[in-house]
């Protein structure tokens, strides 16, 4: 099921892919590289958080089965 947070994560991952694909366009700008590094870290943290929430929901559902 697509939720707003999953939609945002998909959008963030698309931005991340575009930035990595066109690395040469921004490679000479260290400020952009710094911001991109923080962005990638936050995306990874969001993915981990979503996985944790999904895992907790699965555990709660299994208790009822």
Image (tube, rainbow, N blue to C red):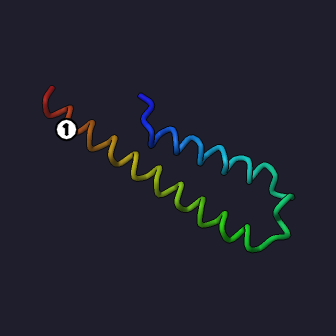
Q: Residue at x 47, y 39 (%)?
A: 6
Residue 20 vs residue 51: left or right?
right
User: Dividing the image into 4 quarters, which one contains the C terminus?
Assistant: top left
Residue 9, x across and y down, in percent: 52, 45
Q: Residue at x 81, y 57 (%)?
A: 23
Residue 10, x across and y down, in percent: 56, 40
Quadrant of residue 41 in the image? Answer: bottom right
Viewer-side residue, 63 vs 42: 42
View extreme (left): residue: 64
User: Dividing the image into 4 quarters, which one contains the N terminus?
Assistant: top left
Quadrant of residue 27 in the image? Answer: bottom right
Residue 3, x across and y down, in percent: 42, 35
Residue 56, x across and y down, in percent: 27, 44
Viewer-side residue, 7 vs 20: 7
Residue 43 vs residue 25: left or right?
left
Q: Residue at x 26, y 39 (%)?
A: 57
Viewer-side residue, 7 vs 23: 7
View extreme (bottom): residue: 30
Q: How many residues crowd mark 1 within 10 Å: few (<14), some (14–19), many (20+)? A: few
Identify residue for label 1: 60
Local SS, label 1: helix
Viewer-side residue, 12 vs 59: 12
Above or below, 34 against 46 in this view is below
């Amino acid at each position: 099921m697509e939720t707003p947070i999953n939609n945002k994560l998909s959008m963030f991952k698309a931005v991340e892919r575009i930035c990595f694909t066109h690395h040469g366009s921004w490679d000479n700008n260290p400020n952009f590289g710094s911001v991109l590094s923080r962005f990638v870290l936050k995306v990874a943290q969001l993915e981990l958080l979503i996985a944790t929430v999904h895992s907790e929901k699965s555990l709660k559902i299994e208790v009822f089965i």
